[in-house]
Image (cartoon, grey):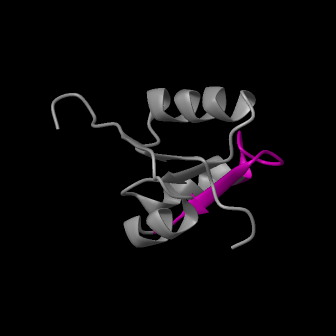
Amino acid sequence: MSTPCDFGLIGLAVMGENLALNVESRGYRVAVFNRTVDKVDAFMQGRAAGKQFVGCHSVEELVQALAPPRKVMLLVKAGA
């Protein structure tokens, strides 16, 4: 891992992707995780390509990517 991330986001549905992009556009390095790992890969290869994101395939990996004190936002799908 190179530079630690400033912010972590769990949940890459429509709102999660847009929040992550908004935070990154303000100059923060963002670590992202989703329960469905394919969504992480698709986001990293699509909308996040070339930006300050770290895609994580486990919660442990997300925690390791964050600089202390760790800041994480968890988004839960409505009705879940």
Q: Nearer the viewer, residue 58 or 73?
A: 73
The N terminus appears in which quarter of the rendering? bottom right
The residue under the point 78% across, 48% down is 49
Furthest residue in direction front, as rendered: 69
The residue under the point 39% across, 65% down is 59
Q: Position of residue 40 (x, y in %)?
A: 54, 55
Q: Which contiguous range is marked in magenta?
A: 45-57
Q: Nearer the viewer, residue 29 or 10?
A: 29
Residue 66 vs 23, above or below: the answer is below
Residue 66 vs 18, above or below: the answer is below
The C terminus appears in which quarter of the rendering? top left
The residue under the point 63% across, 54% down is 5
Horizontal relation, residue 7 to residue 54: left or right: left
Asked if residue 55 lies in the magenta stretch, the reply is yes
Q: Position of residue 8 (x, y in %)?
A: 50, 48
| Overall secondary structure of the magenta section | loop
Q: Position of residue 20 (x, y in %)?
A: 58, 35
Asked if residue 71 lies in the magenta stretch, the reply is no
Q: Position of residue 30 (x, y in %)?
A: 62, 47
The residue under the point 75% across, 69% down is 2
Count of numbered labels shown in the rendering: 0
Furthest residue in direction right, as rendered: 50
State which quadrant residue 26 falls in: top right
Residue 26 vs 36, above or below: the answer is above
State which quadrant residue 41 falls in: bottom right
Residue 65 vs 8, above or below: the answer is below
